[in-house]
Image (spheres, rainbow, N blue to C red):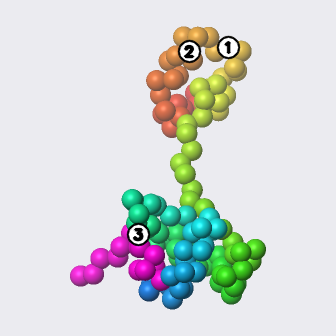
Amino acid sequence: MTQRKIALSIEEAADYTGIGRNTLRQLVEWKKLPVLKVGRKVLIKTDILEMFMEANEGRDLRDRGNVKAVTRTVAKSPPPVKQVARDAGSKPALLGRASRRWLSLFTPWEVYPL
């Protein structure tokens, strides 16, 4: 059984995609391809690499202006208490300090409208 790696080094990514090592390094330097740096080692997630390949299909990767950057999505922080209360149907003016404190104990997906 072969396991698929989650991240590849520059050399492995070059073998995996057929893109040259120097071209990959240039894309990382241009911040077109997000990477994880561990000491001196640079790792590229395979799913990010595949998204990059799809986004830049048919483009010249050596032309900086022609290459589309791929970004990682980061989880959002939960909304503020007033927003949760508003979504639950409460009027902000009716929320006292005790209500806000009570609402802050719950995560947004645990507060349901009445």
Q: Label 1: few (<14), some or many (≥20) within 10 Å?
A: few
The mark found on residue 99 in the picture is 2
Dividing the picture into quadrants, the one containing residue 81 is top right
Q: Is residue 109 above or below residue 3?
A: above
Q: Quadrant of the C terminus?
A: top right
Report the amino acid beneath label 1: Leu
The mark found on residue 94 in the picture is 1
Q: Label 2: few (<14), some or many (≥20) within 10 Å?
A: few
Residue at 52% of width from left, 69% of height from top? 48
Q: Earlier in the sequence, mark 1 or mark 2?
A: 1
Residue at 41% of width from left, 73% of height from top? 8
For label 3, the SS is: strand
The mark found on residue 7 in the picture is 3
Left or right placement of residue 59 versus residue 54 in this view: right
In magenta stretch: residue 57: no
Q: Is residue 71 above or below residue 17?
A: above
Q: Is residue 88 above or below residue 33?
A: above
Q: Quadrant of the N terminus?
A: bottom left
**Front label number (3 vs 2):** 3
> How far from the left and from the top, in percent, is residue 112?
54, 32
Q: Earlier in the sequence, mark 3 or mark 2?
A: 3
- The stretch of residues the image draws in magenta is 1-14
